[in-house]
Amino acid sequence: MTEASPLQVVDLEIDYGKVPAVRGVSFSLRSGEITTIIGSNGAGKSTIMKAIAGLLTPTSGEIQFHGNSIVGLTPDEIVVRGLSLVPEGRRLFASMTVRENLEIGAYRRQNVQAVKRDLGRVLEYFPAIEAKLGERAGNLSGGQQQMVAVARALMSSPKLLMLDEPTIGLAPANVEIISDIITAISKSGVDVLLVEQNAGMALDISNYAFILERGKIVIEGSSESLVSSDEVRRAYLGA
Ligand SMILES: Nc1ncnc2c1ncn2[C@@H]1O[C@H](COP(=O)(O)OP(=O)(O)OP(=O)(O)O)[C@@H](O)[C@H]1O
Ligand SMILES: [Mg+2]
């Protein structure tokens, strides 16, 4: 028997009222890889991520996590199964401390020792925020807040980490830090689904890519093959 894909999405359709946002999207991830969905403004990337995370209900279609349907589960139930989302715009609790934000990421977990160990492990990725544990999250720079958002998601000890535009609005140095961390997370054995408008960065660190336009996948392939495609270079890499 072959192992089920970490995540399989089949014929996903999502409408906002009568307006279709995602129109028949199918894709699956391979374990051990970074998979990316690239698309411009309004393509439907966040809508797909929200549906996978249980934050909105698809009109139709199927979403399977390691072979089991997760459609209709609550966001909490989905986190407990091992799927965690770093949402667009970070969504930190600005007036709470960095430590409190990180603890919220683990609130579903019972094993206090394991949570403590994971806090130490998660902070190894982010030396810059370890010194800021007692500060209010809202006082951190944009780059540091993004690091807290990624760290918070890791505190749920996910098998699959989904990131919705983690580098938008960041200075180039921070983009590099975040993309290095995503690579390190992948190497540690966590599957990664990365959504980006920054096609250059996303193709650089991913294994496989889907390009989404107006709610549909229009191109897919190994990230390497997409980087060398003239069509992709012209339309998405400004080359
Ligand atoms: N709550 C909503 N109500 C109505 N329409 C929405 C809502 N959220 C998104 N849309 C529409 O659905 C489409 C897809 O939006 P979505 O946010 O998924 O795009 P995106 O690819 O994440 O874009 P961006 O890169 O700007 O974040 C867009 O046309 C958008 O205007
Ligand atoms: Mg979005």
Image (cartoon, helix red, strand yellow):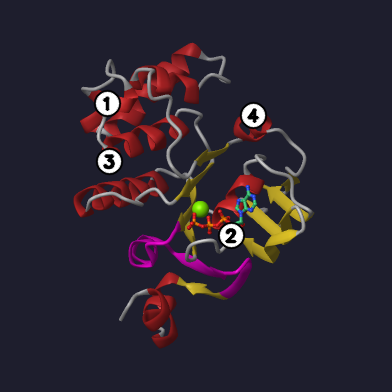
Mark 1 vs mark 3, foreground winner is 1
Asked if the residues shown at circle 1 and circle 3 are in contact, with their CB atoms under 8 angstroms apart, the answer is no
Q: Nearer the viewer, residue 51 or 182?
A: 51
Q: Nearer the viewer, residue 11 or 208?
A: 11
Boundaries of the magenta span = 196-218
Q: Which residue is mark 1?
A: 139
- Return the disc, 4 or 2, that comes first in the chain's sequence: 2
Residue lying farthest bottom?
Answer: 230
Q: Which residue is mark 4?
A: 76
Q: Looking at the image, which residue is at 62% across and 42% down?
A: 53
- Separation of disc 1 and disc 2 at Cα? 31 Å
Across and down, in percent, residue 71 comes to 75, 44
Structural crowding at the residue carrying mark 4, measured as other residues with C-alpha within 10 Å and reported as few (<14), some (14–19) or many (≥20): some
Structural crowding at the residue carrying mark 3, measured as other residues with C-alpha within 10 Å and reported as few (<14), some (14–19) or many (≥20): many
User: Within 8 Å: ligand 2 and the Cβ of disc 1?
Assistant: no
Q: Which residue is mark 2?
A: 44
Whether 177 is among the magenta residues is no
Q: Which residue is mark 3?
A: 143
Mark 3 vs mark 4, foreground winner is 3
Above-or-below relation of 92 to 84: above
Asked if the residues shown at circle 3 and circle 2 are in contact, with their CB atoms under 8 angstroms apart, the answer is no
Q: Which amino acid, mark 3?
A: Gly
What element does badge 4 sit on? helix
Q: Which amino acid, mark 4?
A: Asp
- Return the disc, 1 or 2, that comes first in the chain's sequence: 2
- Separation of disc 1 and disc 3 at Cα? 11 Å
Q: Looking at the image, which residue is at 63% across and 66% down?
A: 215
- Return the disc, 4 or 1, that comes first in the chain's sequence: 4
Q: Point out the image quarter for the N terminus.
A: bottom right
- Separation of disc 4 and disc 2 at Cα? 23 Å
